């Protein structure tokens, strides 16, 4: 084991792996249809990391301190045979937790296989229970019912389920309380996500962000909440339990209450680039290393040096930046998967 610390003394603990840059949704805040249209050039198969390459990287990252793996995308369940990859990662000694973020459209079909392969947790994105508003948010691609069926199936097979709701002003803020009510009743943890300025395609404006304090205020008025401590250091969501204790909610407030000081996450894009921040402007090409004659030790040394030089704290710095600085070409969310 050769655990590494970055320039701000943050360890490397979590690895988020994007397994595809494709998606069957066109969420306006992530892959707007105007940008990701029918002619958009997605990655060809040979440019995407194979399962064996991903497995090799997981083994290397575990030696550097990673314990938790999250599979994401694009839409990860579009990747053929995904449960097989989960099984391969599950076999790697030192991996303590495997999670996935998905839009839920294919979850009903794959939940059992994923569970059998070793998936522990699933975060399902759902921005509204109102059909029309959901269609408006996802580029008119998917139905609420399909996602809810995916959620129920996942819970039924024994996966731990959380719901992710991105809140965008003027789009779905009216759904904050209805979503809270619905998922409190179902006893699933709902996590509100402040709309973030990831990538360059979504035309982000600060005015479109519904702030954490407003979200908490609204839910608290529906059913009183109390703040609870994080489950572990570096947990991204601030947690609040309902006082009548049926379940809890979380808020991921990257914009108004950042959490860079405890950020221990590395991200790998579908094409095998390593990013040390969600808002990074450039990554390190691991695919080239994997496909060269370099051995695991050499690749591990390259990854350590990237992490040891890491100084990222974009969300902490966001408010100090000018619009021009913010517009630097950032990696798209659909490439690294949140
Ligand atoms: N397709 C899967 C899904 O939607 O769950 C996985 C990939 S998606 C990029 C991962 C998460 O990022 C989702 O929960 C999505 O809602 C969130 N996300 C995407 N763009 C975002 C943005 N601009 N601000 C906040 N969250 C965003
Ligand atoms: Fe697809 Fe997820 Fe992005 Fe929506 S948030 S476009 S479902 S990758
Ligand atoms: Fe981590 Fe970058 Fe997000 Fe800060 S802005 S929490 S460093 S991913």
Image (cartoon, rainbow, N blue to C red):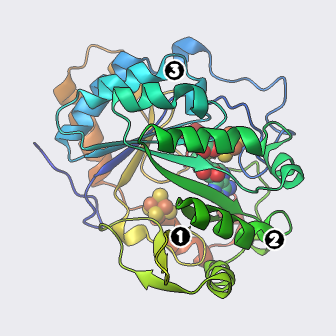
What is the C-alpha distance between the residues marked 3 and 2? 39 Å
Residue at image location 74% in from the left, 68% down from the top: 178
Is 150 above or below relative to 214? above
Horizontal arrangement in the rendering, residue 126 relative to residue 191 (left or right): right
**Image quarter in which the N terminus is found:** top left
Horizontal arrangement in the rendering, residue 217 relative to residue 10 (left or right): right
Percent coordinates x, y for residue 335 in the rendering: 59, 38
Mark closest to the chain's N terminus, 1 or 2: 2
What is the C-alpha distance between the residues marked 1 and 2? 17 Å
Residue at image location 62% in from the left, 15% down from the top: 44
Is 39 above or below relative to 269? above
Horizontal arrangement in the rendering, residue 199 relative to residue 120 (left or right): right
Q: Which mark is residue 48?
A: 3
| Label 1 sits on residue | 249
Residue at image location 28% in from the left, 24% down from the top: 56
Q: For the residue labelled by badge 1, is the local secondary structure a helix, a strand or a loop?
A: strand
| Label 2 sits on residue | 174
Percent coordinates x, y for residue 244 in the rendering: 49, 81
Q: Badge 1: few (under 14), some or many (20 or more) residues near its Cα, within 10 Å?
A: many
What is the C-alpha distance between the residues marked 1 and 3? 35 Å
Residue at image location 61% in from the left, 35% down from the top: 74
Q: Badge 2: few (under 14), some or many (20 or more) residues near its Cα, within 10 Å?
A: few
Residue 334 in sight from this viewpoint: no
Is 152 above or below relative to 37? below
Mark in the foreground, 3 or 2? 2
Mark closest to the chain's N terminus, 1 or 3: 3
Q: Which residue reaches farthest left?
A: 1
Q: Nearer the viewer, residue 226 or 301?
A: 226
Are dots 1 and 3 in contact, CB under 8 Å? no
Q: For the residue labelled by badge 3, is the local secondary structure a helix, a strand or a loop?
A: loop
Q: Nearer the viewer, residue 240 or 272?
A: 240
């Amino acid at each position: 084991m050769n655990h590494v610390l970055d320039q701000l003394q943050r360890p490397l603990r979590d690895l988020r792996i994007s397994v595809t840059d494709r998606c069957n949704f066109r969420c306006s805040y992530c892959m707007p249809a105007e940008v990701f249209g029918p002619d958009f050039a997605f990655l060809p198969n040979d440019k995407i990391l194979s399962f064996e390459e991903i497995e090799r990287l997981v083994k290397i990252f575990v030696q550097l301190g990673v314990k938790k793996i999250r599979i994401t995308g694009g839409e990860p369940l579009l990747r053929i045979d995904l449960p097989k990859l989960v099984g391969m990662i599950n076999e790697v000694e030192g991996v303590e937790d495997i999670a996935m973020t998905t839009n839920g459209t294919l979850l009903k079909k794959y939940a059992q296989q994923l569970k059998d392969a070793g998936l522990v947790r699933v975060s399902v994105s759902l921005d509204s229970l109102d059909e029309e508003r959901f269609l408006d948010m996802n580029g008119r691609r998917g139905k609420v019912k399909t996602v809810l069926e995916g959620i129920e199936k996942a819970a039924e097979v024994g996966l731990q389920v959380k719901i992710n709701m991105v809140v965008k002003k003027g789009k779905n803020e009216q759904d904050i309380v209805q979503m809270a009510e619905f998922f409190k009743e179902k006893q699933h943890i709902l996590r509100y996500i402040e709309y973030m300025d990831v990538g360059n395609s979504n035309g982000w404006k600060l005015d479109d962000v519904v702030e954490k304090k407003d979200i908490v205020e609204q839910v608290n008025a529906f059913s009183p909440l109390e703040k609870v401590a994080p489950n572990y250091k570096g947990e991204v969501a601030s947690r609040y339990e309902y006082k009548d204790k049926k379940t809890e909610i979380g808020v991921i407030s990257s914009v108004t209450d950042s959490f860079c000081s405890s950020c221990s996450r590395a991200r790998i894009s579908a094409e095998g680039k390593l990013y040390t921040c969600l808002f990074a402007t450039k990554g390190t090409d691991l695919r080239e290393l994997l496909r060269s004659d370099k051995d695991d030790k050499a690749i591990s040394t390259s990854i350590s040096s990237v992490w040891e030089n890491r100084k990222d704290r974009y969300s902490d710095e966001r408010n100090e930046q000018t619009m021009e600085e913010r517009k630097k070409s950032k990696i798209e969310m659909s490439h690294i998967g949140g």
